Image (cartoon, rainbow, N blue to C red):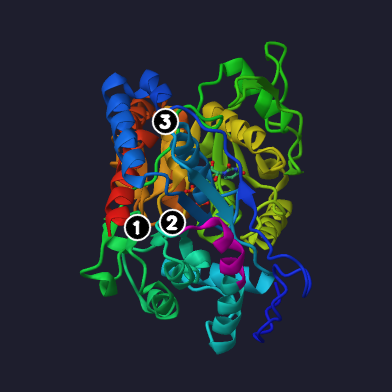
Amino acid sequence: MAYTGTPQPLTVLAQGPDAAPPVLPEAHVTGADPLLLSGTVGPARADELDTAFHGVREALAGRRIIDVNSTMNGGGVAEMLHRLQRYSRGAGLDARWFTMRGDPAFFALTKQLHHFLHGADASGPPLDRAGAEHYAAVCEENARALLSAVRPGDVVTLHDPQAAGLVAHLRQAGARVVWRCHVGTDDPNAYTDRAWAFLRPWLETADAYVFSREQYVPGWLAGRRVAVIRPSIDPLSAKNWPLTPSAAAAIVSRVGLRAPADRDGPAVYRRGDGSVGRVRRNSTCLCSASPPPADAPLIVQVSRWDPLKDMAGVLTSFAEAGDSLDGAHLALVGPDVTGVTDDPEGGRVFAECEALWHRLPDQVRARAHLACLPMADSEENAVIVNALQCSAAVVTQKSLAEGFGLTVTEAMWKGRPVVASAVGGIRDQIEDGVHGILLDDPSDGVSFAAQTSSLVGDRCLAGALGAGARCRVRDNFLDDRQLLQQISLYRNVARV
Ligand code: UDP
């Protein structure tokens, strides 16, 4: 991704001098009654949520709640917004979700900020004056397009570095503004300092700030309104709804990650609107000598193609572990690299993994598989991820840094044994040896392979960790809990 460092003309949204002000893309999410969660979380928790929604609806008195991020597909923020919007709308709130537009230079710069907030170095564009001017110009243009949908008193949540530059514009328009940051590190360093030096001037006037962990809150926010809200998953979504083993097997076969078997059912699932969906698309890109046999244990990692997810590290460890993995196959799975518009690194990271895969010895390559999943239909994409997680003997998440790690939560909810790095929000989810296995040093490929192979070979331990994991998620990381915190924040901010 080339970045020239020179400010770009304002062409991201504008369509010509006489064109009407452009409008930002809006996601139209169908509402769902939060009481539907009752069957999973129990009537007491569902009633508490229903009462809280009733209260905030009265307090907002018709004012909107609006979310703004930079993609509708791919990654944890988009995943979460779908459901927060779904239940908020179902509860009668006027909830809207817009996504920003930007050019490659804008997304290269904001990806650089993303890495820096994780405390990681990256080879992106410099955070210099030219970069800041371009960032300002793109944000200003997005703000102009957004303002037609925002009224004074509306509560607007802006997500991550991409949307930080909208804060002042929205405050000026009379909105109440929350900035929510989904990334961070427990050990701030020179990179995090550089990110905050860039972002802080944009963020000063927000009414409140939200982080996924206390450790991520920068010191300069002392005395401001800060909430720590951990992400969560929706047990009723296509991503997490229970699948029968035969449906899961058929769906995994459909995308080329398992050989079909006679006993397989059709590759069907229940869609959010109640209709029956059928997985029709294959993986958009598949590196696989031939599909894993139907009865082979499958080690699965699902992630965006991002260097911090360390897909390449997983592949290397798998190759080095050799026979100790007991005939297991590895599936590294991510989104179609053209499908996540705000992530400029996907193509490069996938290409690096692909090159590594081609260099593997034949007998290892036969057991390692890379797949890019179709993104054209988000429910279809979600159910494929669901089927892969359900079918896994072990799920891994060998991230070098992680804001929270929804893929870990999703696997835990399915009762899968997880081996994951002890970084960021993963540490809030897994107590080592109780809800999964934590890898102290995420760069230690030898330990990673040893922990993974011990779980592949020990069904009893795998079963116990999976059962602990499911309880952990039920008690702490389902959407009703996050929605309650979110509602409390809306009430506080609306009162400002
Ligand atoms: N995901 C997906 N399809 C893919 C790859 C990832 O739906 O091909 C989802 C994954 O299931 C999870 C989210 O993207 O819900 C990733 O969230 P996480 O918090 O793990 O990481 P992030 O991408 O936000 O850094």
In front of the other: label 1 or label 3? 1
Question: In the image, is residue 434 part of the stretch drawn in magenta?
Answer: no
89 and 372: which is toward the camera: 89
Going from N to C along the chain, the mark reached first, 1 or 3, is 1
The secondary structure type at the circle numbered 1 is strand
Name the one closer to the observer, 353 or 336: 336
Quadrant of res 270? top right
Mark 1 Cα-neighbour bin, 10 Å: few <14, some 14–19, many ≥20: many
Q: Which residue is mark 2?
A: 157
Residue on which the image places disc 1 = 210
Amino acid type, residue under disc 1 in the picture: Val
Give me the residue at 55% from left, 56% from top: 149
Using the image, determine if residue 214 lies above or below residue 17. Answer: above
Q: Position of residue 333 (x, y in %)?
A: 62, 43
Q: Which mark is residue 413?
A: 3
**Magenta part of the chain:** 141-151
Which of pointers 2 and 3 lies earlier in the amino acid sequence?
2
Give the number of the disc on residue 159. Answer: none
